[in-house]
Image (cartoon, helix red, strand yellow):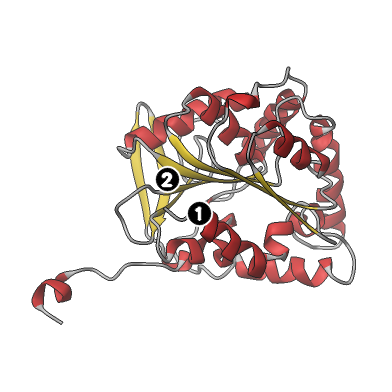
């Protein structure tokens, strides 16, 4: 090893060890984490309802970060980011654009899950030249049938989780059967692997505002997804109670040339339950 190699800082490829950073754009200070080798097009992760930086599965992020620059971030009003949660998905997409431009990127790959997938669709439609490749998981299109029912489903499962002293994600993301229950426990355990510099939990008010934005998205007129020309990878479980699995099929039909994987015997968190199969597939899809 020569001196120049010795001087280089080691590349962090474990999400549990990813350094926490902030960037200010306008009046908002965005909290984010980055890992993986820098250079090239980064993969920006768009997170789900009520989620913060601590809600990404390391078994999905770490394989991607092995060879790619990965960035996760908190939207305004969420976790350690300042500002307020907007009341529409379109405004969330505008905030995401502001964050990405604040970091100086003109081209990104997008990895999105659930609410994040709705934001990602709006971002890509409005700024098609920004996005090279698009990953949409556990999500559906604007105006998708029964998306607006997510409010009732979410509150019901929060109640069920409270009564059993469980994490609501165990009910919302996984089937309550002999396969789903242990997969849920394993997922929740993985989310605890980071022990230092953890994020702030979302506030009840911010969570409620996000829910209303999703409801509005579900009741809106459909977007013209035929304008999306980016290579797109769509995935879900076959029994998604939050964003009905049929909507993943609809996305596939409406986004020309997209790929679709539906995992059996799994729910909203199908990609987490099947991370050993999903992670290699998405790494291959996102390859430069």
Which label belongs to residue 199? 1
Which label belongs to residue 35? none
Task: Report, in whole angstroms, how far the alpha carbon at label 1 lies from the one at label 2.
Answer: 9 Å
Looking at the image, residue 3 sits to the left or right of residue 138; the answer is left
Q: Secondary structure at mark 2?
A: strand
* Rendering coords of residue 278 (x, y %): 64, 62
Which residue sits at x=55%, y=65%?
58
Residue situated in front as seen by the camera: 99 or 134: 134
Looking at the image, residue 269 sits to the left or right of residue 131; the answer is right
Which residue sits at x=72%, y=64%?
273
* Rendering coords of residue 235 (x, y %): 69, 50
Q: Residue furthest bottom?
A: 1
- Pick the quarter of the image with the N terminus: bottom left
Q: Residue furthest top?
A: 221
Give the labeled residue for mark 2: 31
Residue 69 picture quarter: bottom left
In the rendered view, tell whether residue 151 sits above or below residue 36: above
Q: Residue furthest left?
A: 3
In the rendered view, tell whether residue 99 sits above or below residue 167: above
Q: How many numbered discs?
A: 2
Can residue 203 be seen in the rendering of this structure?
yes
* Rendering coords of residue 90 (x, y %): 58, 24
Sequence-wise first label, 1 or 2: 2
Residue 224 picture quarter: top right
Cβ atoms at labels 1 and 2 below 8 Å apart: yes
Q: Residue furthest front?
A: 257
Q: Residues within 10 Å of mark 2 (few under 14, many from 20)?
A: many
Can residue 188 be seen in the rendering of this structure?
no
* Rendering coords of residue 8 (x, y %): 19, 69
Q: Secondary structure at mark 1?
A: loop
């Amino acid at each position: 090893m020569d001196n120049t190699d010795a001087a280089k800082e080691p590349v962090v490829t474990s999400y549990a060890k990813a350094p926490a950073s902030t960037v200010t754009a306008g009046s908002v200070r965005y909290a984010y984490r980055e890992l993986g080798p820098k250079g090239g097009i980064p993969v920006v992760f768009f997170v789900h309802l009520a989620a913060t930086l601590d809600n990404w599965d390391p078994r999905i992020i770490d394989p991607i970060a092995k060879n790619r620059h990965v960035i996760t971030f908190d939207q305004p009003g969420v976790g350690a980011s300042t500002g307020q949660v907007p009341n529409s998905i379109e405004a969330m997409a505008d905030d995401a654009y502001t964050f990405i431009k604040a970091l100086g990127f003109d081209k990104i790959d997008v990895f999105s899950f659930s609410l994040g997938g709705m934001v990602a669709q709006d971002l890509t439609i409005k700024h098609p030249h920004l996005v090279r490749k698009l990953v949409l998981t556990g999500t559906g299109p604007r105006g998708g049938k029964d998306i607006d029912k997510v409010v009732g489903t979410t509150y019901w499962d929060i109640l069920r989780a409270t009564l059993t002293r469980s994490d609501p994600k165990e009910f919302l993301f996984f089937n309550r059967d002999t396969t789903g229950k242990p997969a849920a426990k394993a997922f929740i355990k993985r989310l605890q692997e980071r022990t230092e510099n953890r994020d702030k939990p979302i506030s009840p008010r911010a969570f409620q505002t996000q829910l209303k934005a999703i409801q509005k998205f579900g009741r809106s007129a459909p977007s013209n997804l035929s304008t999306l020309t980016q290579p797109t990878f769509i995935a879900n479980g076959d029994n998604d109670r939050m964003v009905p699995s049929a909507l993943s099929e609809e996305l596939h039909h409406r986004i020309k040339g997209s790929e679709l994987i539906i995992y059996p015997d799994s729910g909203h968190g199908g990609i987490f339950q099947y991370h050993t199969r999903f992670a290699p597939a998405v790494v291959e899809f996102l390859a430069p």
